[in-house]
Image: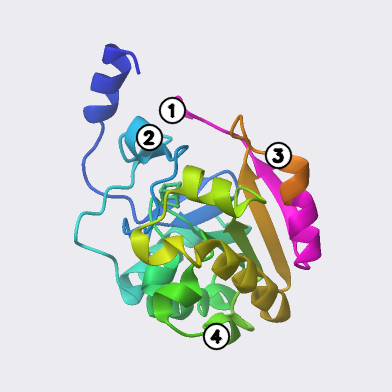
Amino acid sequence: MPLALNVKIKLMKQHPDVVYRYGRALYINLTNRCPNACVFCMKKSWNMRYRSYNLELGKAEPEAPAIIDELKRQTAQQQADEIVFCGYGEPFYRLDTLLETAACAPKLPGKPKTRVNTIGLGNMIAGEDVTPKLKGLLDTICVSLNTSSPEQWLEIVRPQPAFREKGFEGVCDFVRRCTKYVPQTVVTAVEYPSVDIPAVRRLAASLGAGFRAREYMPDYQDK
Ligand code: SF4
């Protein structure tokens, strides 16, 4: 990253953004905890910023009442099509907060849809099958699988040791289970140079899910 750009990013406002708007959606930044260290992760190269928002929460993770108040405030100013649980961290570490917040969506102006972007290790994090809890609360779940190969999954997602042995199959199993409870279950893959995108699309179909490729964005974008 050019030095001037790095300095500019560091000089941006410092308070964390918990609810942030991008396009026609409101995004919710629940946690910075994540069990992976993906090779394409933007956390470092974008210095915990996302398009001018500061996603660095530190230890102060937001609770549902404060998030819901902020959603009410922002949707009163401008409605959103969707609220999306997605920050620089894994939302399933905050499952109770996620579910409580998602339940408020039908009461917000415009009744936005709900979506979670996840790495798909939610059941392994919880130690139980949590997918039935999603029923009736989520419209879409996007599971970032990123490859069709268990070996490549270890290389590019770089999970913590607890997830290395059974993680890839655990994510595939999570996807299958989500299709029973969430109307739209979508596998995603970042268009990282070594990834066989058509193979991930075929794997997604075999799991009963849709598929979407995501742009690889190594360089910071302000807008
Ligand atoms: S799962 Fe997301 S936040 Fe975690 S390392 Fe990968 S890209 Fe970064």
Relative to residue 189, is residue 10 depicted above or below? above
Task: Please give left or right for residue 166 compared with residue 206 in the image.
Answer: left
Front-most of residues 181 and 174? 174
Q: For the residues marked 4 and 1, what is the alpha-carbon distance in whole angstroms? A: 36 Å
Residue 119 lies in the magenta-colored region: no
Q: Secondary structure at mark 4?
A: helix
Q: For the residues marked 4 and 2, what is the alpha-carbon distance in whole angstroms? A: 34 Å
Residue 203 lies in the magenta-colored region: yes
Three-letter residue code for mark 3: Asp
Label drawn at residue 133: 4
Q: Indicate how the structure is coloured in the image.
A: rainbow
Mark 3 — residue? 196
The segment highlighted magenta reads 201-223
**At which x and y percent is residue 158?**
42, 49
Label drawn at residue 222: 1
Mark with earlier residue (4, 1): 4
Mark with earlier residue (4, 3): 4
**At which x and y percent is residue 80?**
58, 57
Q: For the residues marked 1 and 3, what is the alpha-carbon distance in whole angstroms? A: 29 Å
Q: For the residues marked 2 and 3, what is the alpha-carbon distance in whole angstroms? A: 32 Å
Task: Please give left or right for residue 50 compared with residue 169 in the image.
Answer: left
- Whether tag 1 and tag 2 are in contact, CB under 8 A, the answer is yes
Front-most of residues 207 and 110? 207
Task: Determine crowd level at label 4: few under 14, some 14-19, many 20+ residues with C-alpha closer than 10 A.
Answer: some
